[in-house]
Structure formats: structure tokens, C-alpha cells
Image (cartoon, helix red, strand yellow):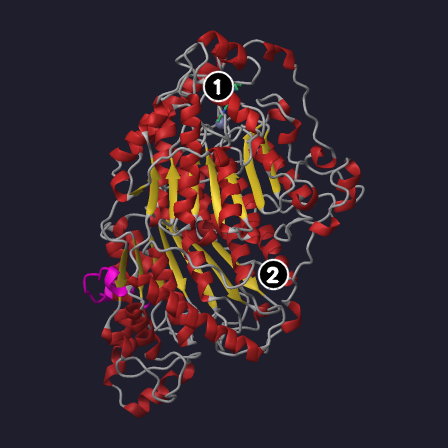
């Protein structure tokens, strides 16, 4: 629906809600969704007999499997049986001759295979290579089949040999048959899929996979790889960012070449947030295949990178709301046994929905990676409308990175050295050996310090009858009514979510706890309400802005605080992974000395101070997305503007995203998460995430006037779940359309319980121009505090890019018209309304403050 038509809109919303209800009620009848896991020790048989130590060794599979068992993950998975690929499957993407040749190697002598191997780049043969290649390929297809036939939600296949370097008629780089590419083709052919995303996080460029779908828009290939301007293997021009696809496939091949080694989580996360997520959300894949190599991980001699094993779990979490959760990891490279095994195990844990181990506070990406990212955006922004945060560079301006005005220059490799048999050469020199030894030490420390957070219960859900007693005496139909909570509770029950949660210890709140935020005069005044008669109560709040009270107001408001504190207790004591407080009155407008905007006590602010004093964490980051309309929307004035960034030592720890002009929807909120909230949050590295979970930005909410879908709230929750080791607590704030609020909060709870994030009802559109302007202005204000916000720079415009060198001259048809539906639909101002979803994060002292000072761009 491009233009909002209220009548169609209402029907649409009804249908959507009905669909949601059916889906959710159906879901609780079904068995919980499982994670598929495939390991078969037959695939450990082959090795390089000329150099048995040589990197691609059987121990890779064994160690990975052992680590998954040590973490108790294997028994939680649904075991999928390995199987051989059929002849037909092997030739889906490969020449028959190639398959035949591979088959023949099984009966060749060692001398014969050695001669054959010399014709290829980094290839050895072994009598079992053919059988294992068939097993690896068949197993990859089998896992995809299990996922697409909905027998499992997602899965991981531990296979050898790897596949992504294998080409139609050439073996390459330890790969014989291309497992991931063939599995994608299988999905297209057998399930009629139209959109498959391949994420290749192996440190090498999966050129085999790239070639297979280079002109096919149904398969989006995304790869981050070591390149060093072509000096690094496989030394191909085609690994450059300028290779964006051909014909109908233009824009559907995304290469992010790394031109330095030593890249770590900060570099990789910048690529994920700036390049992968925008494209992936816009593409809306029906299936995600991951070429899951772990050779970018700390300690791997092939990659010489420094990605921590936990990073891969975060990528799994960030991708999991897409494709209805259908995510399939297929092993590729990874040659440091410890970091490989750890990376595999933590990825599998993430597929199972375990909280992601916390990453160290992110720094700015190094300048070379920043340059690579900007070069990618330069060539991709004509295909993907999500890339809209970079302006266009004036003709006579020199960019920070001159390469933005140049075509990439690939260092020409002397390929003559390849004539000798590559597998007999050492893979790295003495100097590199020392570096890697250092990385391995660091890795060992990292693994020793890792404590995987394990709780038996996923969600602690707080609610109390007393919360229903607060009500407006004057307006029976006041939107902030007790039915808001009863409607939520009954939906939780109907959707089968309630019994899956644990309940917190019942508790009230002490005056001391209230005074963490509020003045004693305010507390006393609220206490004394119970002594007033009805007439006095009706008149009472006259002096306050949008406040009503009754004689039970104090009881309810203090119970609301008590409930959220008890949920925080449960989460901080690891009795539950995360929490939800179904509470009212809401809190986030309440000030130190007075109530405001339906709020009596500030639930979330008290929870933040409480967690600081009781659990010894001492920094709070406040992030708020809200309707602002230049100060003309409640609560008015400039406090909510983007220039309000905190004071004193708190400077930079308040982040306001003040929307103006038009009705914001899913696209704008998702964009703000990708562009602003996630980078800042990963840089801040909170130990607890508190969400002021208001649902009045949802569509059909008369007070908010925005149009978010309930699904979008679940998505935002899912994106935040990677932070703080999964310690996230949602506290209800506004939300005055009861159906929307119930659906929204229940979907959030469902996601916290480990269910798949429901798909968004509409495709991602380009965020409205006013939202883009707001976001770039916010980034402009905040970038002095947060080093990860370093991508709002001007890029050469399309004509200029085209003139630089011959990139796809006929790409115009691929660029789609952007949807710009924000401006035309300015809403009337609605007074005395609340509309926002705020996020408050809390972190500890040893966090990033010092680091941030140091974190200018690394070399
Ligand atoms: N120093 C996979 O990861 N080694 N294949 C190049 C350059 C070849 C990698 C050594 C690496 C092949 C699946
Ligand atoms: Zn690799």
C-alpha cells in the first residue's frame, strides 16, 4: 500500500491481526521449532597425504563437533543424517566431466593424483575425496531440504570438503563441488524460491559461488574477504567491489574486499551494519545460506584477522529475523582448530537462540575498511534504496579517500609461481608465524574468559492485579485504561506465551527506591492521594500536564515500579535470560518532582538507577526515537531535540532521534536501528538494556499517528537481543490501540522466548526524506561522541562513478524508484499524546569511555 487509504488500511490491519492471531495460536499447538545439526565422521577421512599437516585437515571437523558437544548443544538439536549427492545433484551446477574426473581420482595412484593436482590451485586428492565431496554436497542439500520443508527452523551442516571456490569445471582451494551454490540452486528449483541470500563470511572470496549466479537476480551473493588489492589469494580482479553482477543480476553481487589484515570485530560489524543489513532487509530473502568459514577468526593463519568467535553469533542473531528464520550455515574454511571450533559452537548456540556472548566495546573501523565500505556504497547505491545517507560530492571536491574517485587498481600477481605444487609450500612465513602465535595466545585468553550465560528460563514476565486499580475518574473512556493490561494478558494466554514465562518474586517498592529518581515531596504527595475524597481527586491533577489520579494511584504506580524492579532482579541474577514488565501507569514522562503525561513514577529511570546501585553497573545510555514535529508534539519544547545530548560527564550519553513531518513506519525505525542505534549500542557495550516499550507508534494508534506494524516491534527487540549478553528488559509505556499494543507486546515476548520473528507485513521502503534528514542530522551531532558513526560522507554521484571506469553502463533498469510516502501525509497535531519507543542502556565503568578517547582510526 503506497498511499494510505484509511478504509483499506483498516481492513488490512484487521486481516493482518487476524492472520497474526491464527498464526500465533497455531504456533502454540505445534512443537517448538528445532535447529538441525549435521555431522558425520565419514567426512573426516580425506587428508593431504603429501603434507598431512596441511591446513585442510580432518581435525577441523572433529574439533568443531567436540566443542559443540562440550557446550551441550548437540543434544538440543535435531540430528540430520548425512547423505550422498545424486549424479543429478552433482551436475546441477558442475560439468559432467568434472564430476567424472573427481570420481576417477578415487582409483588413481598417488603419483597420478599428484600430477593432476598440479593443474589446480591449492588442491590435493585422496581416495576418499570423491565420496566425501558427494557427502558434503548431499548433506548441504539435505539440510536445506529439512529447513524448507519446515522440519527444522534453521540448521548447521559440518561438512568437509568445503565448496565455495569450486567452479563449474574447476576444482580450487580445497573445494571440489560447490556445496552452498548447489544448495541454493536446489532451493530455487525444488521450492520455487525467488530470493536466496548467500552470506559468505569465509575470509576468502567465494569466487566459485559468485560466478554461478553472477547474472541471476534470485541469488544475492554477499562476501567479505581478504584481498589486499589482489596480493592475497585467490588474487582475482573479480573479488573487487566493482563486481556487482551482470545483466538482470546487477546489484545482486556484493563484494567487500579487505585491503589490510588484522581486521577485527569493529571492522566486521561496521560492514555488517552498513552494507549487509540494509541490502538484506531490502532484498527480503526467503532463505539465507551462510558460507560459514571461520578463517577470519583470531588465530587462523590463512586469514591473519582478529574476529572473535562470538562475532559470528551476533551475525546469526542480526540475520535471524529475516527469511522467517530459515538460516542454514554450511561449513567452509577455518584453519586454527581452536577458533574454528569455538566459532562453530557459538554459531550453533546462536541458531538455538542462546544469548550472544558480549563483544568488547566496538571501536571505529580502521580507515582501510571504512574506505572499502564507502567504495561499496559508491557502486551499490544506485541499486539499493536503503543506501541514502551519503550526499553527493561536489565536482571540485577531493574526498577523504582518493580511491573513491578511482577505479580499483589490482596489483598484478605473478602467477608463474603457481606452476609448482602449492600444497607443499608453507602457508605463511616466519614473521607471520610470530604474529599468529600472538593471536593464538590472545584467543586462548579469550576462550578462558568466555562465560556463556546460561539460564533455565528464557523470559521473566511481571504483572500485578493492583496495576488495574489506577483509573481516570473523569473520563471513563480515557485511553490509558486498565483494559490495556487485561487485553495484553489475555492475548499472552491465548497465544500460549504466558505459561512459557516465569513469574518474578512478588515485591512492592520502598520509598528509598522511589527516591532514586523522585523528590520526597512528590512521593509523599502521591502517597496521600488515598486519603482524598473523589471530588478532590478529580480536581487534584489540574496543575499537572495530562495527569489523572484516583485513590489507588499510589498503590498501582508503586507496584508498577516494584514489578519492573523484580523483573530486573530476575534478569540480573540470571534466573531468566530477559524480562517483560506488563505495567501501568507508564513512567517515562514522570519527572523528579511531579507526574506528567499519564506517568506517576518513572519506572524505567528508577530501574536504571536501581540496577546501577544494586548490581554495580554505572553508566546509562539513553536513546529515544520519538515523534517531535519541531517541538510541537507532546511533551513539547526542545528537550527531545537532537541537540540535547546530555550534560557534564553524561555528554554524549543521551541520543534523541526526533522525527518530524509525516507518519513514520517500519522502514524509518529499522533504518534508525541500522544507522544509529545498533552502532552506538555496540560501541557503548551495555550490561543491561532497558526498553521503554511504548506501542503508540503502532499503526491505528490515534495518539501517536504513526504506522509501525506490531511485527516491527518484535524485530527491534530481536536486534537488541545481541547486546548485554541478552539481558534485556521491556517495560510497557504507552500504546492506546489495545489490539496493536497487545499484538506488539506479545510478539516481542514471543521473540524473547526464542520464537522466530514474524515477517514484516510490507517490504522495506526507502525511509521518508524527512526521516533521512533527521537521521543524518542526528549522526552529525552524535559522531563526535561515537566513532562508529563515520559513514555520512559525500560520495561521487552516479555519472561520475560511471565515468571513472566501465561499470555496467546499462544498470538504469535495476535502480528502482524509491517510495517517498512520508511528506504528503502530514498528520494533524495530536495534543497530550505520547509516542515513542525508547531504549535505555546501562553499562559498567570499565566499558568504552577510555577506549573511545583512544579510538581514533587505527592504522
Ligand atoms: N597465503 C577455503 O578456505 N591458501 N579455501 C592460500 C596464501 C589457499 C582456502 C595461501 C586457501 C584455500 C575453503
Ligand atoms: Zn577460506
Task: From the image, tell me which residue sits under label 1.
Answer: 104
Q: Is residue 743 magenta?
A: no
Which percent across, then down, holds residue 441? 36, 22
Local secondary structure at mark 1: helix
Residue 509 forms part of the magenta stretch: yes
In the image, residue 110 lies at what x, y percent?
45, 9
Secondary structure of the residue carrying numbered label 2: helix
Residue at 55% x, 55% y is 671
Q: Where, quadrant-wise, is the N terminus in this rendering? A: bottom right
Residue 112 is marked as none
Q: Residues within 10 Å of mark 2 (few under 14, many from 20)?
A: many
Say above or below: 318 vs 666: above
Classify the position of the C terminus by image quarter: top right
Q: What is the span of residues highlighted in magenta in the rendered image? A: 498-519
The secondary structure that dominates the magenta segment is loop
The residue identified by callout 2 is 771
Q: Quadrant of residue 531?
A: bottom left
Q: Is residue 113 left or right of residue 733?
A: right
Q: Look at the picture and state if 524 lies above or below 641.
A: below
- Disc 1 from disc 2: Cα separation: 61 Å
| Tag count | 2
Q: Is mark 1 within 8 Å of ligand 1?
A: no
Note whether 511 is above or below 385 in the view shown: below
Quarter of the rendering containing residue 240: top right
- State the residue at coordinates (39%, 59%): 691
Q: Quadrant of residue 297?
A: top left
Q: Is residue 619 visible?
A: yes
At which x and y percent is residue 69? Answer: 26, 34
Q: Is residue 582 left or right of residue 130?
A: left
Amino acid at each position: 500500500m503506497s498511499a494510505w487509504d484509511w478504509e483499506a488500511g483498516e481492513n488490512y490491519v484487521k486481516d493482518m491481526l487476524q492472520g497474526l492471531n491464527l498464526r500465533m495460536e497455531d504456533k502454540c499447538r505445534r512443537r517448538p521449532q528445532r535447529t538441525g545439526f549435521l555431522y558425520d565422521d565419514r567426512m573426516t577421512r580425506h587428508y593431504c597425504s603429501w603434507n598431512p599437516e596441511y591446513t585442510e585437515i580432518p581435525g577441523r571437523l572433529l574439533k568443531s563437533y567436540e566443542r559443540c558437544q562440550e557446550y551441550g548443544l548437540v543434544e538440543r538439536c535435531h540430528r540430520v543424517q548425512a547423505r550422498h549427492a545424486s549424479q543429478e545433484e552433482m551436475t546441477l551446477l558442475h560439468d559432467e566431466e568434472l564430476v567424472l574426473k573427481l570420481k576417477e581420482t578415487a582409483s588413481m595412484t598417488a603419483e597420478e593424483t599428484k600430477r593432476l593436482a598440479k593443474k589446480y590451485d591449492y588442491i590435493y586428492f585422496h581416495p576418499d575425496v570423491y565420496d566425501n565431496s558427494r557427502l558434503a554436497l548431499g548433506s548441504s542439500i539435505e539440510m536445506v531440504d529439512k529447513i524448507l520443508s519446515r522440519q527444522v527452523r534453521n540448521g548447521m551442516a559440518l561438512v568437509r570438503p568445503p565448496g565455495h571456490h569450486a567452479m563449474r569445471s574447476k576444482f580450487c582451494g580445497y573445494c571440489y563441488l560447490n556445496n552452498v551454490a548447489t544448495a541454493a540452486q536446489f532451493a530455487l528449483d525444488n521450492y520455487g524460491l525467488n530470493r536466496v541470500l548467500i552470506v559468505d563470511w569465509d575470509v576468502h572470496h567465494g569466487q566459485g559461488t559468485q560466478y554461478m549466479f553472477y547474472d541471476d537476480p534470485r541469488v544475492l551473493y554477499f562476501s567479505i574477504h581478504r584481498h589486499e588489492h589482489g596480493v592475497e589469494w585467490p588474487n582475482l580482479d573479480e573479488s573487487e567491489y566493482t563486481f556487482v553482477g551482470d545483466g538482470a543480476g546487477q546489484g545482486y553481487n556484493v563484494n567487500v574486499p579487505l585491503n589490510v589484515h588484522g581486521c577485527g570485530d569493529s571492522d566486521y560489524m561496521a560492514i555488517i551494519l552498513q552494507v549487509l543489513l540494509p541490502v538484506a532487509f531490502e532484498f527480503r530473502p526467503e532463505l539465507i545460506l551462510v558460507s560459514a568459514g571461520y578463517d577470519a577468526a583470531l588465530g587462523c593463519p590463512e586469514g591473519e584477522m582478529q574476529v572473535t568467535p562470538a562475532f559470528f553469533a551476533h551475525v546469526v542473531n542480526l540475520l535471524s529475523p529475516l527469511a522467517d528464520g530459515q538460516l542454514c550455515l554450511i561449513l567452509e574454511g577455518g584453519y586454527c582448530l581452536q577458533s574454528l571450533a569455538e566459532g562453530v559452537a557459538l554459531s550453533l548456540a546462536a541458531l538455538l537462540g542462546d544469548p550472544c556472548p558480549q563483544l568488547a566495546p566496538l571501536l571505529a573501523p580502521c580507515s582501510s575498511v571504512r574506505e572499502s565500505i564507502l567504495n561499496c556504497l559508491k557502486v551499490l547505491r544506485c541499486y539499493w534504496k536503503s543506501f541514502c545517507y551519503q550526499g553527493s560530492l561536489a565536482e571540485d571536491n577531493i574526498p577523504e579517500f582518493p580511491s573513491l574517485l578511482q577505479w580499483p587498481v589490482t596489483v598484478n600477481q605473478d602467477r608463474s609461481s603457481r606452476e609448482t605444487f602449492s600444497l607443499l609450500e608453507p602457508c605463511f612465513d616466519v614473521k607471520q608465524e610470530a604474529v599468529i602465535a600472538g593471536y593464538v595466545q590472545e584467543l586462548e585468553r579469550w576462550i578462558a574468559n568466555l562465560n556463556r550465560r546460561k539460564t533455565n528460563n528464557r523470559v521473566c514476565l511481571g504483572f500485578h492485579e493492583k496495576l488495574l486499580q489506577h483509573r481516570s475518574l473523569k473520563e471513563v473512556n480515557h485511553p490509558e485504561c486498565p483494559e490495556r493490561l487485561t487485553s495484553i494478558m489475555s492475548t499472552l494466554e491465548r497465544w500460549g506465551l504466558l505459561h512459557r514465562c516465569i513469574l518474578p518474586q512478588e515485591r512492592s517498592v520502598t520509598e528509598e527506591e522511589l527516591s532514586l529518581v523522585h523528590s520526597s515531596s512528590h512521593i509523599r504527595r502521591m502517597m496521600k492521594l488515598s486519603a482524598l475524597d473523589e471530588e478532590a481527586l478529580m480536581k487534584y491533577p489540574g496543575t499537572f500536564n495530562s495527569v489523572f489520579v484516583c485513590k489507588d494511584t499510589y498503590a498501582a504506580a508503586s507496584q508498577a515500579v516494584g514489578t519492573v524492579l523484580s523483573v530486573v532482579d530476575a534478569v540480573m541474577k540470571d534466573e531468566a535470560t530477559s524480562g517483560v514488565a506488563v505495567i501501568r501507569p507508564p513512567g517515562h514522562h514522570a519527572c523528579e518532582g511531579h507526574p506528567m503525561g499519564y506517568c506517576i513514577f518513572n519506572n524505567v529511570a528508577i530501574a536504571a538507577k536501581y540496577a546501577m546501585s544494586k548490581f554495580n553497573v554505572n553508566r546509562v545510555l539513553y536513546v529515544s526515537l520519538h515523534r517531535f514535529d519541531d517541538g510541537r508534539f507532546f511533551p513539547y519544547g526542545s528537550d527531545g531535540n537532537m541537540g540535547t545530548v546530555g550534560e557534564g560527564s553524561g555528554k554524549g550519553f543521551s541520543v534523541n532521534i526526533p522525527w518530524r513531518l509525516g507518519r513514520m513506519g517500519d522502514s524509518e525505525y529499522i533504518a534508525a536501528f541500522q544507522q544509529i542505534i545498533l552502532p552506538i549500542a555496540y560501541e557503548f557495550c551495555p550490561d543491561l538494556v532497558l526498553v521503554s516499550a511504548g506501542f503508540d507508534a503502532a499503526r491505528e494508534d490515534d495518539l501517536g499517528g504513526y504506522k509501525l506494524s506490531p511485527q516491527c516491534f518484535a524485530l527491534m527487540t530481536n536486534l537488541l537481543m545481541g547486546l548485554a549478553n541478552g539481558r534485556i528488559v521491556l517495560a510497557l509505556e504507552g500504546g492506546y490501540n489495545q489490539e496493536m499494543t497487545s499484538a506488539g507486546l506479545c510478539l516481542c515476548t514471543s521473540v524473547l522466548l526464542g520464537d522466530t520473528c514474524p515477517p514484516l507485513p510490507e517490504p522495506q521502503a526507502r525511509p521518508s526524506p524527512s526521516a533521512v534528514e533527521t537521521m543524518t542530522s542526528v549522526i552529525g551531532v552524535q559522531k563526535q561522541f561515537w566513532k562508529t558513526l563515520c559513514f555520512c560522507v559525500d560520495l561521487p554521484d552516479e555519472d561520475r562513478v560511471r565515468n571513472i571506469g566501465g561499470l555496467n553502463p546499462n544498470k538504469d533498469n535495476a535502480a528502482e524508484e524509491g517510495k517517498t510516502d512520508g511528506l504528503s501525509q502530514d498528520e494533524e497535531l495530536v495534543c497530550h499524546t505520547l509516542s515513542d519507543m525508547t531504549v535505555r542502556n546501562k553499562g559498567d565503568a570499565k566499558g568504552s569511555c577510555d577506549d573511545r578517547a583512544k579510538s581514533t582510526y587505527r592504522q
